[in-house]
Image: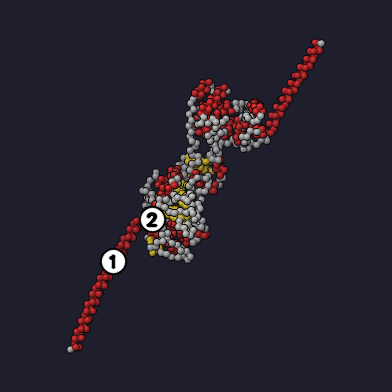
Amino acid sequence: MVFINKINGILKNWKKWHLLQIIVLLVLVIILSFFGLLYFFSKDADISELKNELPQPTVFYDVSGNVASKVSANKNEGVPIKEVPESMKNAIVAIEDHRFYRHNGVDLIGTSRALFRDLKAGGMVEGGSTITQQLTKNTILTSEKTLKRKLQEVFLAIAVEREYSKQEILQMYLNQIYFGNGAYGIKQAASKYFAKEVKDLSISESALLAGLIKAPSALNPYEHLEKATERRNLVLAQMKNQGYITNRQYENARQEKVVLNDMGGDPFRGKFPYYVDQVLDEAINQYGFTQDELLTGGYQIYTELDPTMQTAMEQTYQKDALFPKGNDRLVQSGGVLVEPKTGGVRALVGGRGEHTFRGYNRASQLKAQPGSSFKPLAVYTPALEEGWKITDMLKDEQMTFGNYQPSNYDHQYAGEVPMYEAVKESKNVSAVWLLNELGIEKGLDSVKRFGIPLDKADSNLSLALGGLHKGVSPLNMAEAFSVFPNNGVRVKAHVIKKIVDAKGNVVAEWKVQKERVTTKPVTDNMTTMLLGVVEQGTGKPAQIPGRETAGKTGSTQVPIKGINGLKDQWFVGYTPQLVGAIWVGYDKTDAEHYITPTSGTGSSVIFREVMNEALKNSPNQSFNVPHIASFIEQRKKEEEKKNSFQEKFNNEVQKWEEKWNKQKEKWDKKGKNKDKDKGKGKGH
C-alpha cells in the first residue's frame, strides 16, 4: 500500500514537473517567437528619416570676416558627441535609460513593467521607452500613446540599433531632445539655462538638464526652481547608485547652487534679415544653389556686408517720423548702400514693417520709374561725352516734341538756362530738349552702359525723365551712380564674396565684373553739377553735415486725373567713398494711397540720415572738383558786366541823341532866321 502511494506520488510530481516544463517551454517559445517577430519586422522598418547629421546653420560673414548672421531650416544646432562631457552623457543614461548600454533598443524588463501598469490602469499611461525608442518617437513617429504606435516604436528602435552605434544614437538624441523654454538640443539648452558651451557643463548642471527631459514645462527652473532642483538631486542619486560619480562628487554637486543665466539664444541667428535674403537670392540665381541646400548644408558665406552701415540703415528705417504718413497702409521704402570701387553692397533694407523670410525685397526686386534721378544717366552724361559744356545754354520754355509735351514740375520757365542750372533745378523741358538734340539712341546707349535694363518700349523722349516701361530698383540705381565717384568705371554690385561648404571647400567665388562707362572728365563734370543739386538745388534736404555729397532727386506723378501727388520718390547720391539709393512709395498706388511731399520726410531726408550714420567712422573726403557756386558767380559777373556795358552803351547813345537833338535844334533855329531875313527883304 505504501509502495503504491509512493508510486502515485511520483506520478503526480512527474506530471507537475512535466506541466511546468511544458509551461516554461511555451513561455520560452513565445518569448523567442516575439523577438523573432520583432527582428523579422524590424528588418523592414523605415528609418530613412533618421539621419546622424549634426544640424549646422549657414553662417554669414561680414566684409571683415567676422560672423554677422546665421540661418537654418533646423530649430537646433548640433554638437559632436566628443564635445559632450561624460557627466552629461551619464546623467541622461542614469535617469532616462540605465540599461542603455545593455539592450538592443528595447528594454524588455522596462517594457514589461510599463505594459503591466498599462493593463492595470486600463490604458496607455506609462511609456517605458528607451533612449533609442524616444529618438524614433521624436524624429519619425508621433507622440500619441497607442498600441500600434508602441509596436512601431519597438520595430524602429531595433532597426536603429542595428544601423547605428550607441554613441551615434546618444549624439542624435542629445541634439534633438527638447529641454524646454524653446531649447531644442543640448547646445541650446546649455546656452538657455547656463550661458555656457556644452563642453563646459558641470556635473550639477548636467544633472539638472537631464532632469528636465521628463517634463520640460513643469520642471522649468526659471518658473519652478525648487522642483527642478529636486529632480536634479534625483538624477545625481541615480548617477551615484549606478557608479557614474563618487559619493564626494555627489555631495559636492548636490550642494552646488543652481545659477541660471539665459544667454538669450544665438545673437546672430536671424540678424540682418533683408541682407541675408539678398545673399540667398544671389546664391540661388547666380551660383545655382537651392534654398534647401543653403538652409541645411552648413555653408559659410562671406559677404560684402558692413555691420555698422547695415545697423545704421535698419535703425533709420525704424524712425517713422522720417517717412510720409500712410493712409491706413504703410508707406514702403527700399534702400541700398554700395562701395563704388568694389561694387560691394555694404547695407540693404528691403522694406518697412514685419519682415517675411525671402519675401518682397524692395531694395533689389522693385520695378519703379526713377523720374528725374535718371537724367544724369540718359541725358547729361551723353551730352558731356558729345562735347557739351556744363555752362552751355539749354532751352527752357514750353514746347512740344511731336505728341509729347513735357512740363517743369513748378511750371516755371526761364527761356534758357545753363546746363548746371537745369540739373540743379531739375528742369524737365531742358532735359527733353537736350536729349532730342542728341538723339534718343545716344541716351539709350548711355543707359545700357550704366547697367540699366531696357526694352523696346523705352525708345522715346520720356526716357529723359525716367519714363521706363518696367522700371528700376534702388540696387540698379546705386550701381549706375557708382560710376561717377569711381572715375567712369562701373563694377557689378554684389553681396557674395565666396561660399565655403561644410568641408571647407570653396564652392563659389565672386569674380570682378567691371566696365568702362565713360571718362573721368565727364564724371568730374557730372559730380560738379550733382554737388550743385545738393548744395543749392532740389536735393538740399540730403546734405550731410561736413561732407561733400552729390546726388539727384526724382519723383513720378500719380497717374490719376485730378490728383496732385507722387507715386514714387527717389534720391540717389554719393560721397567719394559710398553710394546710396533710396526709394519711397506705396506698393500699390491708387486714389487713396499716394505721397504728399512733407518737409522733413521722404527719400532725401532718409538718405541723409542713413549716410550720416553709416559714415560716422569714415574720414571726410573731397571730390576735388569745382563747385557750381564758382560758375554761378562767374555768370553773375558776366551778367553784371553785360548789364554795365549795356548801360554805358545806352548812356552813350542817349548822349549822342541829346547832342543830335541839340544840334538839330540849332539847325532848325538857323533855318527859321534865314526865312525871316528873306521875308524882310521882299517886303521892302
Between residue 591 and residue 72, name the one nearer to us. 591
Residue 432 is situated, as x and y percent measured from the top left of the image, at 44, 62
Q: Which residue is mark 1?
A: 647
Q: Residue furthest left?
A: 684
Residue 375, percent across and down?
44, 57
Q: Secondary structure at mark 2?
A: loop
- Tell me where residue 340 appears, x and y as whole percent: 44, 49
Lateral position of residue 113 relative to residue 541, left or right: right
| Residue drawn at 39 percent across, 58 percent down | 425
Residue at the spot 55% in from the left edge and 25% down from the top edge: 234
Q: Earlier in the sequence, mark 2 or mark 1?
A: 2
Q: Is residue 426 visible?
A: yes
Q: Circle 1 sits in a helix, a strand or a loop, which is it?
A: helix
Vertical side of 480 occupied by 156: above or below: above
Q: How is the image coloured?
A: secondary structure
For residue 537, the mark is 2
Q: Amino acid at mark 2?
A: Gly
Label 2–label 1 contact, CB within 8 A: no
Is the residue marked by circle 1 packed among few (<14), some (14-19), or many (20+) residues within 10 Å? few
Q: Amino acid at mark 1?
A: Glu
Q: Quadrant of the N terminus?
A: top right
Q: Nearer the viewer, residue 250 or 549?
A: 250
Residue at x-position 51% and y-position 22%: 251
Task: Locate residue 117 relative to residue 224 in the image: left or right.
Answer: right
Question: Outermost residue toward the top?
Answer: 2
Alpha carbon separation for disc pair 2 and 1: 32 Å
